[in-house]
Amino acid sequence: MTWHVDAEDLRAYAQGELAPPRLWSADTHLLACADCRARLAAVSDPVALDAGWERLDAELDVPRRGLTEALLVRLGVADHVARLLTATPVLRGSWLTAVVLVLVTTVGVVHTADSPTFFLALAPLLPLAGVALSYGPALDPTYEMAVVSPVHGFKLLMIRTVAVLTTALGLNGLATLALPAYGLRALAWLLPALALTTTGLALASRLGPVLAPSLVAGAWVALLATARASGDGATLAPFTAAGQGAAAGVAVLAALLLFAARDRFDLSHRSAV
Ligand SMILES: [Zn+2]
């Protein structure tokens, strides 16, 4: 174990003044680390410490394992991985509701405009946004828990990415079913979606979890604008056979780069603490 609760946080914790997310991080760590428990006992007055442990006890006693988490554990997923997955914010209600609203609106626009282009342009951005939002300290209340958890940083990133990507692709797929008039053409978002997500992740190892997906999203919009300006207007270049092939190539290349950079994710996690 390389990380320990620092002295200032321990004092705040002892006085009941430590705020989330540092509080959660300290809670998780104190359960596993006898050294820090001893340090905590040294800086605490006995009354405040008892109150702190009572609160922690109460939190741990609450039967918090939800249906999804129980199902994951039953399927053989390790306890802490199941907890991290179900605590991933983008797999919870509010984000999913937002995605469904965006997709319903988009399908509505396609039916009105009588062209799938708007849907095809927007659908690849949703998995990219979902994956980008599923890691990084600013947006994720379980980030510090992830940092102190026994899961390897890159493995954790992959577990979450696959879960979020599957959800986002599933929702996109359902939206595609609402556009039967376009047949397989309406599925032309899939390969660009994989290309954008893997490129965003690969760049995140160097540019960070905010700049990388923003640049990738910007590049996608710029590419579509260029294709629109130069094409004949029937089918934009990324949605032609050649464009789909290029998207598949980018996805494979980015996945290789991501795998090559896997150690950087563990380093960035550690330095963020
Ligand atoms: Zn410790």
Image (cartoon, rainbow, N blue to C red):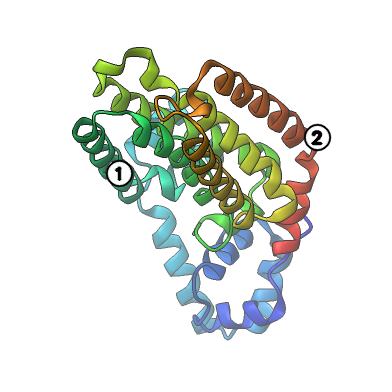
Residue 208 screen position, x and y as percent? 67, 55
Above or below 194: residue 211? below
Above or below 58: residue 263? above
Residue 179 screen position, x and y as percent? 26, 22
- Mark 2 residue element: helix
Cα–Cα gap, marks 1 and 2: 34 Å
Q: Can you name the residue that lies furthest to the top here?
A: 183
Name the residue: 41% across, 30% down: 233
Position of the N terminus by quadrant? bottom right
Amino acid bearing label 1: Val
Q: Is mark 1 within 8 Å of ligand 1?
A: no
- Mark 1 residue element: helix
Task: Find residue 242 and name its label.
Answer: none
Task: Find residue 102 and name its label.
Answer: 1
Name the residue: 53% across, 30% down: 192
Amino acid bearing label 2: Ala
User: Sequence order check: which comes first, mark 1 or mark 2?
Assistant: 1
Residue 77 screen position, x and y as percent? 53, 29
In the image, 15 versus 94, the foreground residue is: 94
Within 10 angstroms of label 1, few (less than 14), some, or many (20 or more) residues?
Answer: some
Name the residue: 51% across, 48% down: 134
Residue 84 in view here: no
Residue 244 screen position, x and y as percent? 55, 21
Task: Find residue 260 and name its label.
Answer: 2
Residue 93 in view here: yes
Quarter of the image where ligand 1 sits: bottom right
